Image: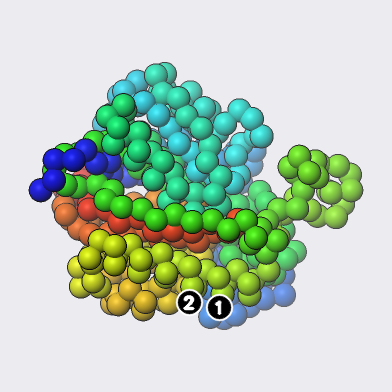
């Protein structure tokens, strides 16, 4: 075992809103069918946060869920990274709001916007602060209220996204467990295929932008799908090769939950049996930065000390990458 300081996930938490938007309900809203949605995405339902509550509300709920299983004094938290594209406000950072609401009086933090790859980026960034020995406890949150930026008259996007999120606690480990390696990428040329047209400094909110429905997700499905199939799989295979891993060595693939076909293609390239792939897109849809921690929370009880795990994602920007980690605790012992 290496005695090099590594950042290990020592606890996970998750939250999804109570309201469930089913495919059958969407059939009454736009020109689509349950069969069409399931065949092309694998989604049967998604959760929606109602009322004037934002990403911070779900993040705090997820952290409370984590603290209930792994008691931590909030004042011992050093840092909070909130990965989201649906921040409560332009400023202050949602991470700051979260810190105040959970009582993390000694923590500083910031929001990280890398779309669907946000949580992956957040883990990589947080791990560096742990590895230097500067900080001992860091919370990384991946959360999005996608319903706030989805046009429910657009049949191509409204069927895909849901609301929800999760979090992890990063702590130092000298026994060889934790984040071993990461490979992250971006390509701004992809922005034209997946973005929100207005709301930023180029096109601030105005009567015109609202009238033209420019404050919603704009996505060109085919270019995004084709790039995601290639890049998410490439990053996963590259990180396996760099760490001398084969499919048989991997306990779990934690893929971004955007599309069943993208996930299948990634697993095939990695040489993984479907039983090793975490999949919950059917019940949550694409929660953007929330998909990876939601998977970890759903599968926590099945994770074992020393499991080799690959997390992979692809998102708007374009952003993508993979992380290889060795799981640091026996999830079956968590109540």
What's the residue at 61%, 36% (across, down)?
88
Left or right: 1 as drawn, with respect to 244? left
Q: Residues within 10 Å of mark 2 (few under 14, many from 20)?
A: some
Q: What element carries label 1?
A: helix
- Name the residue: 66% across, 48% down: 148
Q: Which mark is residue 261?
A: 2
**Nearer to us in this view, 68 or 302:** 302
Q: Position of residue 3 (x, y in %)?
A: 13, 40
Tally the marks.
Answer: 2
Q: Which residue is drawn at 68% across and 68% down?
A: 220
At mark 2, the secondary structure is helix
Q: Residue at x 39, y 19 (%)?
A: 106
Q: Is residue 199 left or right of residue 279?
A: right
Labelled disc at residue 28: none
Q: In this view, does 76 lie above or below 20?
A: above
Q: Which quadrant holds the C terminus? A: top left
Reading the chain from its start, which is encountered first: label 2 or label 1?
1
Between 260 and 234, the one lying in front of the other is 234
- Location of residue 91 (image quadrant): top right
Is 38 displayed left or right of 217 in the figure? left
Residue 121 pos. (x, y %)? 45, 48
x, y percent for residue 125: 41, 41
Q: Is residue 205 left or right of residue 279?
A: right
Would residue 170 be visible to someone looking at this image?
Answer: yes
Residue 40 is tagged as 1
């Amino acid at each position: 075992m290496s005695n090099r300081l590594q950042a290990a996930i020592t606890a996970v938490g998750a939250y999804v809103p109570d309201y469930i938007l089913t495919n059958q309900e969407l059939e009454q809203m736009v020109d689509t069918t349950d069969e069409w949605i399931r065949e092309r995405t694998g989604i049967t339902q998604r959760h929606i946060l109602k009322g004037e509550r934002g990403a911070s509300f779900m993040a705090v709920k997820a952290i409370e869920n984590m603290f209930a299983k792994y008691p931590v004094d909030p004042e011992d938290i050093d840092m909070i990274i909130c990965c989201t594209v649906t921040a409560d406000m332009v400023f202050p950072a949602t991470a700051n709001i979260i810190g105040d609401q959970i009582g993390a009086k000694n923590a500083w933090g910031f929001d990280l916007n890398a779309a669907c790859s946000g949580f992956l980026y957040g883990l990589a960034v947080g791990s560096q602060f742990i590895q230097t020995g500067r900080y001992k406890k860091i919370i990384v949150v991946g959360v999005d209220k996608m319903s706030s930026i989805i046009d429910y008259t657009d049949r191509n996007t409204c069927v895909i996204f849901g609301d929800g999120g999760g979090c992890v606690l990063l702590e130092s480990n000298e026994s060889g467990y934790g984040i071993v390696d990461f490979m992250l990428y971006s390509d701004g040329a992809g922005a034209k295929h997946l973005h929100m047209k207005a709301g930023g400094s180029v096109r601030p909110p105005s009567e015109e932008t609202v009238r033209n429905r420019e404050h919603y997700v704009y996505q060109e499905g085919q270019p995004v799908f084709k790039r995601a199939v290639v890049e998410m799989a490439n990053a996963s295979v590259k990180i396996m090769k760099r760490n001398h891993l084969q499919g048989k060595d991997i306990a779990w693939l934690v893929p971004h939950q955007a599309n069943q076909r993208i996930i299948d293609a990634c697993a095939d390239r990695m040489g993984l049996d479907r039983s090793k792939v975490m999949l919950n897109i059917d019940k949550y849809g694409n929660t953007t930065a929330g998909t990876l921690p939601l998977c970890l929370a759903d599968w926590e009880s099945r994770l074992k000390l020393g499991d080799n795990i690959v997390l992979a994602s692809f998102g708007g920007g374009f952003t993508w990458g993979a992380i290889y980690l060795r799981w640091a605790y026996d999830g079956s012992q968590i109540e």
